[in-house]
Image: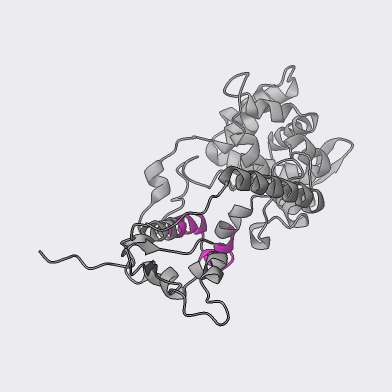
Amino acid sequence: MTKKAFRPDVDAPRWTGGHTPYDIAKEGTIALLVVAILTIALATVFGSPDVPAVTIKRWSNTTPVDFAMTALSELSATSGSALYGAPYNHNAVGQQLGPLQLAKWVGVRIPINAVNDFVINPLESLPNQGALATDLQQWKQASTSQRNGWIADYTKAAAHLSFKSGNVVVTAANAGPVPVLINDLTQMARSGALDQNLVSHSGFYTTDYTLPLLFIADGSYLANLADLQHLKGTQWGMMNETGSYPGQAWLWLYTFWYQVPPFSQSGNADVLVWGFMMALTALLLLIPFIPGLRSIPRWSRVYRLIWSEHYRGLQPASGQGTRPSADRPATSRATGDITRPEA
């Protein structure tokens, strides 16, 4: 029977030489303490800013004009959320990977109607509506063409929109109930009631912040804050949600690809980067099975750097004979056993 040839990339010879005692618990404890000290020190010096959470109340009080314009885009169904597509609506194809329309495969799992969910329903929840109730009824009874006409007239006048004495000021003669709807929604937002309404739509206790997050993202306020903090995607931005601790450094490998073509020039960058990262992950998992690639550590002899202390111990002393090769165990002439000097 032919003896199977030794394969250096796959087979590992059984070690029959000596052993050096090693206290892994001690080494692990020391490593833990060192890393903990470095983490605390670096977090103190280079920690990310602990900025307050962005809420609709904070947004509408800081830049009420931007909020009012965003509310108009929600009412006209022209906002980013309204035109996003799956999983929120059917108004766009959504993210796709080549010919694979992944977003449409997932489907609309979180149905959102921008007009009703962001404007009409919150306004209907207000108590003692008075004149607002009449305007809401007028909006509901109007045809689609009538609504579009009101919105077009208001949008034209919104170029000179301002905020004075707690009210949205705009001159639009044929905008129907739209001025009242936008103004009352702005006041609702400034009081904090809109934040509460958008998170309590599915019950009293909820952790679903989808609606307020989408509403905020549709405006310019959040993007401007990110730009000031150098956190935009084009600025390689990363930070924690709260607390002055190190940011998610592991995210750099994802954010890197958003900076280079073709990802930086594609509307499907999210799914393209995800697909590319999955391919890289598969390549990493398959390295032990790929001839040539799996031999790089042996060819580069990087192991000699990792075990430098051991290999220094194998070097012959001055004036002495040649020691065994550093890359293969020595064989005793007397017994034939494999031996190796201890580090």
Q: Measuring 65% from the left and 49% from the top, which residue is drawn there?
A: 31
Q: Is residue 262 above or below residue 131?
A: below
Q: What colour scheme was applied to this rendering of the protein?
A: one colour
Q: Is residue 183 left or right of residue 78?
A: right
Residue 74 or residue 327, whichever sits in front: 327
Q: Is residue 122 above or below residue 83?
A: above
Q: Which residues are magenta?
A: 255-277
In the rendered image, which quarter is residue 324 located in? bottom left
In the rendered image, which quarter is residue 192 located in? top right
Q: Measuring 82% from the left and 38% from the top, which residue is drawn there?
A: 61
Report x, y in % for residue 45: 81, 52
Q: Is residue 170 above or below residue 126?
A: below
Q: Is residue 60 left or right of residue 288?
A: right
Q: Is residue 80 left or right of residue 243?
A: left
Q: Is residue 233 left or right of residue 265?
A: right
Residue 48 can be seen in this image: no
Residue 110 or residue 177, whichever sits in front: 110
Q: Quadrant of the N terminus?
A: bottom left
Residue 274 in the magenta stretch? The answer is: yes
Q: Residue furthest right?
A: 165
Report x, y in % for residue 40: 76, 46
Residue 243 or residue 180, whichever sits in front: 243
Name the chief secondary structure element in magenta. Answer: helix
Residue 304 can be seen in this image: yes
Q: Measuring 67% from the left and 47% from the top, which residue is drawn there?
A: 30
